[in-house]
């Protein structure tokens, strides 16, 4: 389970928007210098907005703006999402190139690009059509109480 902490910036009926600081995972990654995500995090100040849905551990109604929460995402969602995003468009592009090859080199290139676009379209709508969208959404894990609040209550 991948976990990240952040600050609640907006509360919806069944989810919250969390501002995260993306340094926890990037610091442990072996390719952080050449990764697009790491470059983007450094360019934007290392903060990002994430929509986290409620879980059995924590409801969105229990959160308020400026609360510190922990969100989590299973590693299997990262693996399946990576396979979906990288392999499916490539598969459609290769099928398009093979189909277009019979019409010539220029047609093969056009069919390759068309297949790639169709593949990205399938990736965009496939999880929603199959009811898998919640598999790839981060969930609220716990509410973090700042130590200053704990000390002030005693």
Image: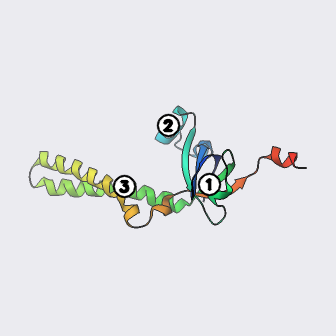
Q: Nearer the viewer, mark 2 or mark 3?
A: 3
**Residue beneath disc 3:** 124
Instruction: Provide residue 148's location: percent of width, then percent of height.
Output: 82, 43
Which color scheme is applied? rainbow
Question: How far apart are labels 1 and 3 at the CA level?
Answer: 23 Å
**Disc 2 + disc 3, Cβ < 8 Å:** no
Instruction: Provide residue 26's location: percent of width, then percent of height.
Output: 57, 43
> Is residue 139 shown left or right of residue 104?
right
Residue in the foreground of this view, choosing between 10 and 83? 10
**Disc 2 + disc 1, Cβ < 8 Å:** no
**As drawn, 120 above or below 37:** below
Q: Secondary structure under badge 3?
A: helix
Q: Residues within 10 Å of mark 3 (few under 14, many from 20)?
A: few
Question: How far apart are labels 2 and 3 at the CA level?
Answer: 22 Å
**Residue beneath disc 1:** 71
Instruction: Give whichever of discs 1 and 3 has the lower sequence position.
Output: 1
Instruction: Give whichever of discs 2 and 3 has the lower sequence position.
Output: 2
**Residue beneath disc 2:** 40
Residue in the foreground of this view, choosing between 63 and 120? 63
Q: Secondary structure under badge 1?
A: strand
Q: Is residue 141 visible?
A: no
Instruction: Provide residue 42's location: percent of width, then percent of height.
Output: 54, 34
Split into 4 quadrants, where in the image is the N terminus?
bottom right
Name the residue located 30 percent from the left edge and 55 percent from the top edge. Answer: 119
> Is residue 60 shown left or right of residue 152?
left
Name the residue located 63 percent from the left edge and 45 percent from the top edge. Answer: 24
Most extreme residue toward the right, as rendered? 154
Numbered circle sitting on residue 135: none
């Amino acid at each position: 389970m991948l976990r990240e902490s952040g600050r609640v910036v907006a509360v919806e009926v069944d989810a919250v928007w969390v501002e995260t600081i993306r340094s926890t995972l990037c610091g442990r990654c072996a390719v952080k210098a050449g990764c697009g995500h790491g470059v983007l995090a450094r360019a934007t100040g290392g903060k990002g907005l994430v929509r986290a849905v409620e879980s059995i551990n924590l409801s969105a109604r229990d959160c308020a703006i400026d609360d510190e929460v922990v969100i989590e995402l299973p590693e299997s969602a990262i693996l399946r999402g990576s396979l979906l995003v990288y392999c499916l468009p490539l598969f459609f592009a290769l099928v398009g190139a093979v189909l277009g090859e019979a019409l010539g080199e220029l047609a093969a290139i056009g069919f390759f690009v068309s297949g790639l676009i169709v593949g990205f379209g399938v990736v965009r709508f496939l999880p929603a059509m199959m009811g898998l969208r919640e598999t790839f959404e981060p969930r609220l894990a716990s509410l973090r109480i700042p130590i200053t609040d704990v000390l002030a209550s005693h």
